[in-house]
Amino acid sequence: HAIDFAGAALLVAAVSTLLLALVWGGSEYPWGSSTILGLFAASAVLTGLFLWWEQRIEEPILPLRLFGGRVFSTGVALSFLLGGAMFGAIVFLPLFLQVATGASATNSGPLLLPLMAGLMTTSITSGRVIARTGRYKRWPIAGMAIAAVGMFLLSTMEPETSRLTSSLYMLVVGVGLGMVMQVLVLAVQNGAEFSDLGVVTSSVNFFRSLGGSFGVSVFGVVFATVLEDRLTKLVPAGALGGAGLNPESLTASPDQIRALPPEVLGPVSMAMADSITTVFLLVVPLLVLGIGLAMLMPELPLKDTAHIGATLEGAEITVAEIAGGEPAVDELTEHETVRIDGDD
């Protein structure tokens, strides 16, 4: 097989230039600067070259024909939205806990355990139920809806919100995300040919990571913009500068906020909390869009094995999968295997 090194390089370059434009825009460089506009233009050109290259190579790293299937196309789109929502929550929740509730940097990580517990529980539960029933479409629909409710609850948090309440909100988000994440992998694998199992699996993971990168970049821009506006309205003029701080340093080192004078600490904490909860609120429409996409995903009969349609020569299969009942086969128990060699 020929590895598509050129396609991989073009894909990485196109994504990287776009992410740089989103990260640097409005912070390192003005949005209308030649650097940011050049990065956007370079990303568009590299994306076009990637699409052109993938159509002419024999073994592309991302076969464009896969997007013609509704299961694959909706699956990767949902993975993209899921990544943005999941990483957006994971990145900004510790910042909220440190700034608004006074949690230390060390404790803000363990405080996310309710989110991860909900995610792991429903990931395992959904897999076991799907294996028994063969029905998987209902899980992404319900999961996106529950995650949307959880994100809305997170957007209502204030500095006075108790740890128990915030933990329950995080648990709701985790429950919803867990009902979607692994089910999407199963859905696209179930709808793919055996020869495409590798590429569809990696594509779902790639688009989920890509959505997370885009989500963190875009939500970071929103957070910085809202924070600057809130600080201007809530904090007395010159107060931050007199303390040697600015919006960038507040974000980079939340511990410095607790060292602010009392007359400044309250308004700064409120400005930071408002900015973070605004990000959570913006995630809700994306998850609602995900509900609509999940409804469009076809539900194909769940396959029992990935080797259906593959050659039996040299393969091991269970007796329960053998049709015809040859005498030699009848002598085996249900869980034994038989090797098919040539015409035997």
Image (cartoon, helix red, strand yellow):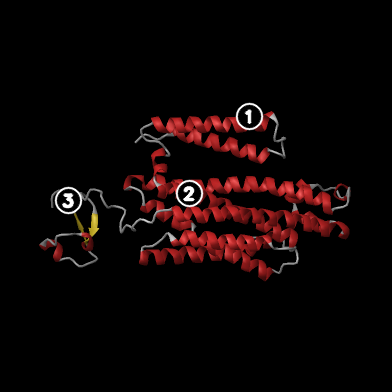
Pointer 1 residue: 38
Residue drawn at (87%, 50%), measured in percent from left and top?
243
Q: Earlier in the sequence, mark 3 or mark 2?
A: 2
Q: Position of residue 113 (x, y in %)?
A: 60, 64
Report how far apart the C-alphas of labels 1 and 2 lie in the structure. Answer: 29 Å
Residue drawn at (45%, 45%), measured in percent from left and top?
203
In this view, the residue in front, 133 or 323, is 133
299 lies left or right of 21: left
Kind of residue sitting beneath label 2? Asn
Report how far apart the C-alphas of labels 1 and 3 lie in the structure. Answer: 60 Å
Question: Crowdedness of circle 2 by 10 Å Cα count: few (<14), some, many (20+)?
Answer: many
Q: Nearer the viewer, mark 1 or mark 2?
A: 1
* Tag 3 secondary structure: loop
* Residue 92 in sight from this viewpoint: yes
Q: Are marks 1 and 2 in contact (CB under 8 Å)?
A: no
Question: Crowdedness of circle 1 by 10 Å Cα count: few (<14), some, many (20+)?
Answer: some
* Tag 1 secondary structure: helix
Question: Crowdedness of circle 3 by 10 Å Cα count: few (<14), some, many (20+)?
Answer: few
Q: Position of residue 108 (x, y in %)?
A: 67, 61
Q: Position of residue 20 (x, y in %)?
A: 63, 37
Pointer 2 residue: 205
Residue drawn at (55%, 38%), measured in percent from left and top?
15
* Tag 2 secondary structure: helix
Residue 113: which disc? none
How many marks can you see? 3
Q: Position of residue 298 (x, y in %)?
A: 39, 54
Q: Earlier in the sequence, mark 1 or mark 2?
A: 1
Kind of residue sitting beneath label 1? Gly
Residue 316, above or below 5: below
Residue 341: which disc? 3
Q: Nearer the viewer, mark 1 or mark 3?
A: 1
